[in-house]
Image (tube, helix red, strand yellow):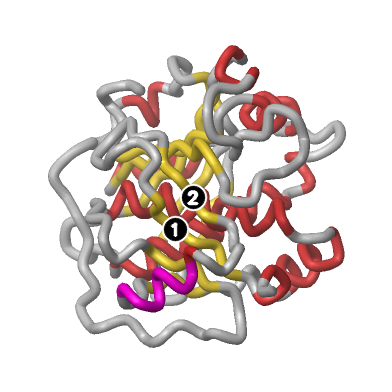
């Protein structure tokens, strides 16, 4: 992974893997490791004087991933379809960078989608690019130093809807956690039927992000829900469970 990435995330396995050969969520090496590697760029709008709340940024990142996965340009003969196929044929990588002022305006002018969180956090997602093929407007973005906080304790998650549960025992920066939340949202999306996806999309992709207590986390890990296991390129050990993707349609 490039040294200029603010934070990265790569999914390597899934507790209930797809039966399809070469699934990016199977543990261990697969043919996907031999394919050209692509990355999904996400850029957080982060002004010095008005930073977004951490939880709202996590939700916005997850919704940004869902939005580009469901966008008509990502399918069939759409403008982004080939890039999306190339990305999903390899390991699923996401990189989060941050921008402010003129940098944000330049990033926002590139082909992509900006998603705004419930409390104003802005995340722009772009079509996948080769690992070494960053546009100059994104390659030079600021990369270090800033984390996010919640000025007030986040509201309790809406348990009647989708929830991305964060591992309470894994400490990650905001950027890293945004990438992991995106992975979790993508896992849930892939597990749903077309009818369930349509309903979620038409509702505006509502979701919660929350950190359970240790006992609840243990229950979730045994629930059969999709689990994100990180490749360990940055911050945490390879194979670390970071997010459990909980959607009402996936609960057993």
For the residues marked 1 and 2, what is the alpha-carbon distance in whole angstroms? 5 Å
Q: In this view, does 226 lie to the left or right of 18?
A: left
Q: Which residue is drawn at 49% across and 70% down?
A: 220
Place of residue 88 in the rendered image (x, y in percent of width and height, measured from the top left): 65, 32
Identify the element where label 1 is drawn. strand
Q: Do the residues labelled 1 and 2 touch (CB within 8 Å)?
A: yes
Q: Residue at x 57, y 69 (%)?
A: 223
The reply to whether residue 106 is visible in this rendering is no
Query: What residue would you read off at disc 2?
Result: 228
Q: State whether the magenta stretch is mostly helix, strand or loop.
A: helix
The answer to whether 152 is drawn above or below residue 27 in the figure is below
**For marks 1 and 2 on the same chain, the one whose residue lies earlier in the sequence:** 2
Please tell me how crowded label 1 is: few (under 14), some (14-19), or many (20+) other residues with Cα within 10 Å: many
Q: Which residue is drawn at 23% across and 36% down?
A: 143
Assess whether residue 4 is covered by the magenta stretch. no
Number of marks drawn: 2
Q: Is residue 166 left or right of residue 234?
A: right
Place of residue 227 in the rendered image (x, y in percent of width and height, measured from the top left): 52, 54
Place of residue 58 in the rendered image (x, y in percent of width and height, measured from the top left): 40, 62
Image quadrant occupied by the N terminus: top left
Q: Is residue 19 left or right of residue 222?
A: right
Q: Residue at x 74, y 40 (%)?
A: 74
Query: What residue would you read off at disc 1?
Result: 243
- The disc label shown at residue 192, or none: none
Front in this rendered view, residue 249 or 174: 249
The answer to whether 165 is drawn above or below residue 35 in the figure is below
Identify the element where label 2 is drawn. strand
Residue 90 position by quadrant = top right
Q: Give the range drawn in magenta.
A: 214-220
The reply to whether residue 238 is visible in this rendering is yes
Place of residue 103 in the rendered image (x, y in percent of width and height, measured from the top left): 32, 39
């Amino acid at each position: 992974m490039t040294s200029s990435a603010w934070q990265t995330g790569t999914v390597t396995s899934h507790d209930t893997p797809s039966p399809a050969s070469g699934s990016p969520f199977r543990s261990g090496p697969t043919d996907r490791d031999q394919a050209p590697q692509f990355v999904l760029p996400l850029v957080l709008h982060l002004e010095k004087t008005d930073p977004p709340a951490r939880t709202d940024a996590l939700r916005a990142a997850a919704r940004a991933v869902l939005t580009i996965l469901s966008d008509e340009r990502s399918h069939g003969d759409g403008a982004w379809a080939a890039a999306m196929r190339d990305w999903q044929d390899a390991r699923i990588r996401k990189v989060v960078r941050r921008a402010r002022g003129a940098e944000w305006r330049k990033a926002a002018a590139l082909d992509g989608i900006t998603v705004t969180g419930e409390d104003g956090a802005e995340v722009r997602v772009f079509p996948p690019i080769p690992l070494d093929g960053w546009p100059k407007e994104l390659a030079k973005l600021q990369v270090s130093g800033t984390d996010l906080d919640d000025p007030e304790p986040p509201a309790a998650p809406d348990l009647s809807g989708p929830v991305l549960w964060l591992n309470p025992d894994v400490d990650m920066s905001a950027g890293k956690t945004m990438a992991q939340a995106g992975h979790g949202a993508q896992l849930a999306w892939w597990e749903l039927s077309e009818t369930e996806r349509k309903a979620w999309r038409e509702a505006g992709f509502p979701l919660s992000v929350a950190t359970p207590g240790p006992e609840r986390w243990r229950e979730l890990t045994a629930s059969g829900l999709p689990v994100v296991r990180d490749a360990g390129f940055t911050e945490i050990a390879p194979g670390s469970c970071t997010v459990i993707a909980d959607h009402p349609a996936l609960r057993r």
